[in-house]
Image: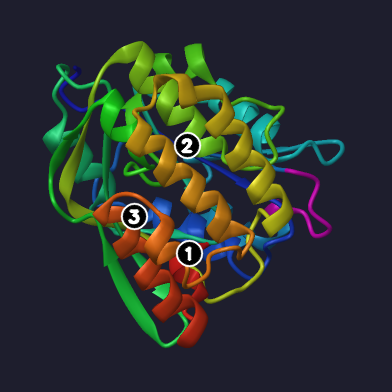
Amino acid sequence: MSLCPKVSIYLISYNREDHVYRAVSSALSQTYSNIEVIIVDDHSNIPVVEIIAKLIERSPNLIKVIRNESNMGACKSRNIAISNCTGEFITGLDDDDYFHEDRVKLFIDNWNDKYSMLCSGYTIIAPNNKIVVNRKGVKISLNDILGRNIVGNQIFTRTIKMKNLLFREDLKSGQDYDTWIRFINKYGAGWRIPYCTIFIDKTNTVRISNIGNKYAGYRDVFERYKHLMSPSQRASHELSINMMTDKVQLTHLFTTRGLANKIRIFKYLIFYKIFQMKHLYE
């Protein structure tokens, strides 16, 4: 690794004029200075260059904006962004989320080539509360990721690895989970650093994937990799699919095998059904 390696931060945006400025600003505000920010505007109604004009004026050498001539979708846009990254390392950012100022520095300080990638814990900004998720440092093997997506929606890795893998462009949702499974299967185990370095904003109910797309994408990923899963992992994923379509009822507590799955059903019935904390299961 270079003494002060360049880190590419890629971001795609589509009609998020109320959030994209905050996202780009958080990328530019990193305490680690050797960065570039690659933005793909997926043909938003208001061009991103207009929304972040002040940021571009302030840091013209750090920002590159590519505008698609038509709307190409999340995965195609991500792959365009990744292909334009020139850093030794890379990490991504969704346009409605934002970074902790030390995110890149913490990844650089914790990098070890025996792992294929790093990820971190995150903080969910939900209506009326904040939820810290996955703060504990832990190794992430293929078996771990097959159980559930404990990586999150972004990773930090060597850019060449992402360019050799890329996102599947046929998926409407579940792209992150599919990519991390393929990534770890190809390159080996990753490591989650014991810090929360990204804020996931769920205060806006309109996310990139609607429930229909989310169900279809998750089902696709499950069918593609279930042959690698243990019986308990398959049961867990089938439970998740039922949760997405709101098919989980009280009777499932008595018919579903496995204590962990029974606990998930109980929490779902309490928090989702009674207290309407739907952000916990999006």
Mark drawn on residue 76 = none
Mark drawn on residue 281 = 1
- Distance from Cα at disc 2 to Cα at disc 3: 20 Å
Q: Residues within 10 Å of mark 3 (few under 14, many from 20)?
A: many
| Mark 3: secondary structure | helix
Q: Residues within 10 Å of mark 2 (few under 14, many from 20)?
A: many
| Residue 42 locus on image (x, y percent) | 75, 43
Q: Would you place residue 96 above or below residue 73 in this image?
A: below
- Tell me which label, 2 or 1, sits earlier in the chain: 2
For badge 2, the amino acid type reads: Tyr
- Tell me which label, 2 or 3, sits earlier in the chain: 2
Q: Is residue 44 magenta?
A: yes
Q: Residue at x 66, y 68 (%)?
A: 206
Majority secondary structure in the magenta region? loop
| Residue 102 locus on image (x, y percent) | 23, 53
Comparing 147 with 129, the one in front is 147
Q: Residue at x 69, y 42 (%)?
A: 216
Q: Residues within 10 Å of mark 1 (few under 14, many from 20)?
A: few
Pair 2/3: label in front: 3
Q: Which residue, as the protein is rendered here, is positioned at the far right?
A: 70
Q: Which residue is mark 2?
A: 177
Viewer can see residue 153:
no
Q: Would you place residue 278 above or below residue 246 in this image?
A: below
For badge 1, the amino acid type reads: Tyr
Pair 2/1: label in front: 1
Q: Would you place residue 10 above or below residue 117 in this image?
A: below
Q: Which residue is mark 3?
A: 261
Q: Are marks 2 and 3 in contact (CB under 8 Å)?
A: no
Q: Quadrant of the rendered structure where residue 40 is?
A: top right
The stretch of residues the image draws in magenta is 42-49
